[in-house]
Image (spheres, grey):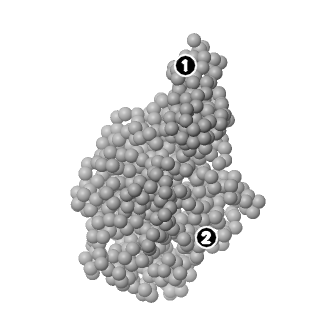
């Protein structure tokens, strides 16, 4: 028998972890995401193209991917990736960007509280604009926009632009505004937006229009305009209906029963997703949090809390029962056990998140999934991570988790991220406080909803200037009628994709799918978000039908695992590790103790098929250990007991 018994403490792995001493860290996630949500990046196997000798300093030279089409007084259009600022309409062939008023628009009396819509009907070659002003005391902020286009219409002037966002007198928040007017080229001012004095709804998320001439937008429902973690009560759902001459707005709300920690704070992100089918009838309202009814360790983590409708939002279902996402293999194999040894998939918004409804009415949620740290009532908002992760090793996985029926789920792995969001490495600040740049994960849907496209930014951590200082744009597409996907594509190489928006709607021409995409960069190079920002259209963000050649689940970022088995377990003098591979791979097998320290490491070149390695455990103390098998950028982890 081994001497002693080690305390069992969970640790969290990363893709492709190498053998070195790691330090286990519990991280409390940022759950508010109200006014300071930003842009970062991550993804494997692209930094070989980087030339570090050409780049240095915390504020890299702006190289601008794309063509400038407008500007704004500051970055406060851009801070939340879940806002819908870029959209498109197939019948009109238009892409439209909603933003704070252009700094360069020469209109008497214009101020930064005006809202502008800027559009192109020729894929960025030329642009036109319109704007909404305010009454002078109500300054409009953080706009989201949608094109309302009646079925059968192909004329721009018969379509309308609807815009919603919060407003301020000069400081603090007083309510939200609603703007709607015909999209008339060269019209300029379309009139004054209507502002509400509702203090408890910060609306700007997932704004979109549907073929029933409706438009929806959501925001957090809070106790007052100054949002606190324990002030979040649920979702405010703002519904606009166009009757041919005007848009009529109504308000609804959904208030889940959240688990609360010992301080009385709800265990939930204070941001709500909302999405509908193309005809506006099948819809989903989703929170990322812990349901009060969750009773098992696997479900007591931040996970989707789903409400659904089949009648265009007239009625909503009760919250779906908590689902055990650890039963989905592609998720659980990449989750490290919690401090109690449980597998707790933890859905995160901190690198961006988005949703869509496909052609079959199924819900798709795209985000990173982390490892829940603890099952303690006061620690459900914590995830586990490692410090000292080598540059180039993935920090996060991006998943599409989708329904296959009512509260039945599956998932595919979209890609992974090799940098992580942190204020200490960000090149941006408001002059005082650094901004936490994230991957800005977003999703775009084809008109028929059978093709979905996933986008994110990623940086090369090997370059000078900070972990997140050199973002580029990446994406993949999935055809959900054939279950085929594309390889990952890189769309920029200028290292400055900081604040991108991809359209929620994709445009099709022949076999080509075009996803209108913007990127925004500070004009003076100071990376101060309070200065003027220029908006650029990234050309050629496209996929061709011929690129859908990979079966979903066979991701080039996920190596070649078939199965991994360890025996005997419990063990004493030795442990056999059998690895079955689909391809020849260099494999690293690492055993970690309860402190996250590597105690055994074996590196082997393995062949396709069955491979067995025997680990000598005779000198290990008794206790629980975690065995990670890594090949390429993929890994799987299992628990081993040494007696």
Residue 582 is situated, as x and y percent measured from the top left of the image, at: 54, 41
Q: Residue furthest top?
A: 1
Q: Secondary structure at mark 2?
A: loop
The secondary structure type at the circle numbered 1 is: loop
User: Which quadrant of the rendered structure holds the C terminus?
Assistant: top right
On-image quarter of the N terminus: top right
Task: In this rendered view, identify the residue nearer to me: 501 or 393.
Answer: 393
x, y percent for residue 640 = 53, 25
Q: Is residue 233 above or below residue 61?
A: above
Residue holding disc 2: 65
The answer to whether residue 350 shows anywhere in this view is no
Residue in the picture at 43% in, 77% down: 94
Q: Going 42% across and 58% down the picture, which residue do you hit?
A: 479
Q: Are marks 1 and 2 in contact (CB under 8 Å)?
A: no
Q: Quadrant of residue 622?
A: top right
Q: Position of residue 133 (x, y in %)?
A: 43, 79
Please name whichever residue, 28 or 472, is drawn nearer the observer in this view of the structure. Answer: 472
Query: Badge 1 local density, few (<14 within 10 Å), some, or many (20+)?
Result: some
Label 1 vs 2, first from the N-terminus: 2
**Which residue is at the front of the view, 364 or 597?**
364
Question: Taking 197 as reference, is 334 left or right?
Answer: right
Q: How many circles with numbers are drawn on the protein?
A: 2
Q: Is residue 439 left or right of residue 445?
A: right
Observer-nearest of 25 and 334: 334
- On the image, numbered disc 1 is attached to which residue? 571
Disc 2: CA contacts within 10 A as few (<14), some (14-19) or many (>=20): many
């Amino acid at each position: 028998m081994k001497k002693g018994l080690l305390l069992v403490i969970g640790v969290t792995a990363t893709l492709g972890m190498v053998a070195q001493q790691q330090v286990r860290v519990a991280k409390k996630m940022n759950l508010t995401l109200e006014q300071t949500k930003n842009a970062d990046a991550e993804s494997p196997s692209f930094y070989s193209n980087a030339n570090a000798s050409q780049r240095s300093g915390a504020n890299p030279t702006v190289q601008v991917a794309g063509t400038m089409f407008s500007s704004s007084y500051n970055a406060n259009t851009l801070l939340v990736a879940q806002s819908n600022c870029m959209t498109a309409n197939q019948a009109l062939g238009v892409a439209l960007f909603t933003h704070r008023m252009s700094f360069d628009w020469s209109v008497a009396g214009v101020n930064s509280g005006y809202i502008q819509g800027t559009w192109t009907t020729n894929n960025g070659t030329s642009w036109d604009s319109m704007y909404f002003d305010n009454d002078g005391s109500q300054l409009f902020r953080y706009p989201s926009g949608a094109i309302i286009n009646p079925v059968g219409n192909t004329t721009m002037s018969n379509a309308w632009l609807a815009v919603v966002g919060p407003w301020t007198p000069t400081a603090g928040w007083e309510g939200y505004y609603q703007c709607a007017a015909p999209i008339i080229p060269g019209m300029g001012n379309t009139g004054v937006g209507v502002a509400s004095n509702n203090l408890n709804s910060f609306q700007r998320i997932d704004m979109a229009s549907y073929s029933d001439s409706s438009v929806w937008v959501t925001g957090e429902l809070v106790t007052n305009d100054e949002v606190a973690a324990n002030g979040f009560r649920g979702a405010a759902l703002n519904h606009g209906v166009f009757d041919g001459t005007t848009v009529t707005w109504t308000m609804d709300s959904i208030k889940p029963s959240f688990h609360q920690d010992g301080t009385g704070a709800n265990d939930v992100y204070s941001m709500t997703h909302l999405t509908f089918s193309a005809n506006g009838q099948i819809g989903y309202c989703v929170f990322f949090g812990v349901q009060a009814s969750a009773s098992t360790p696997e479900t007591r983590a931040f996970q989707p809390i789903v409400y659904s409708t089949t009648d265009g939002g007239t009625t909503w279902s009760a919250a779906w029962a908590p689902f055990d996402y650890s039963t989905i293999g592609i998720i659980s194999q990449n989750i490290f056990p919690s401090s109690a040894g449980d597998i707790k998939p933890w859905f995160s918004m901190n690198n961006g998140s988005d949703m869509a409804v496909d052609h079959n009415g199924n819900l798709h949620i795209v985000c990173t999934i982390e490892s829940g740290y603890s099952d303690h009532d006061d620690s459900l908002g914590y995830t586990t991570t490692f410090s000292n992760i080598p540059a180039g090793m993935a920090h996060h996985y991006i998943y599409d988790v989708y329904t296959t029926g009512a509260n039945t789920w599956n998932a595919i792995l979209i890609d992974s991220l090799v940098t992580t969001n942190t204020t200490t490495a960000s090149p941006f600040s408001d002059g005082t406080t650094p901004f936490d740049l994230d991957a800005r994960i977003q999703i775009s849907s084809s008109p028929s909803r059978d093709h979905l496209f996933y986008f994110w930014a990623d940086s090369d951590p090997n370059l000078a200037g900070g972990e997140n200082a050199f973002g580029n744009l990446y994406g993949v597409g999935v055809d959900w009628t054939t279950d085929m996907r594309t390889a990952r594509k890189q769309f920029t190489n200028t290292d400055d994709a900081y604040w991108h928006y991809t359209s929620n709607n994709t445009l099709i021409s022949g076999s080509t799918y075009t996803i209108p995409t913007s990127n925004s960069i500070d004009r003076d190079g100071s990376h101060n978000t309070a200065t003027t920002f220029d908006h650029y259209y990234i050309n050629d963000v496209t996929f061709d039908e011929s690129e859908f050649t990979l079966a979903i689940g066979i991701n080039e970022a996920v190596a070649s695992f078939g199965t991994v088995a360890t025996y005997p377990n419990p063990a004493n003098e030795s442990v056999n590790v059998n690895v079955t591979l689909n391809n020849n791979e260099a494999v690293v097998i690492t055993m970690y103790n309860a402190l996250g320290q590597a105690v055994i490491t074996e590196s082997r070149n393995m062949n396709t098929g069955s491979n067995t390695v025997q680990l000598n455990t005779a000198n290990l103390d008794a206790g629980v250990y975690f065995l990670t098998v890594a090949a390429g950028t993929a890994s799987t982890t299992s628990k081993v007991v040494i007696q």
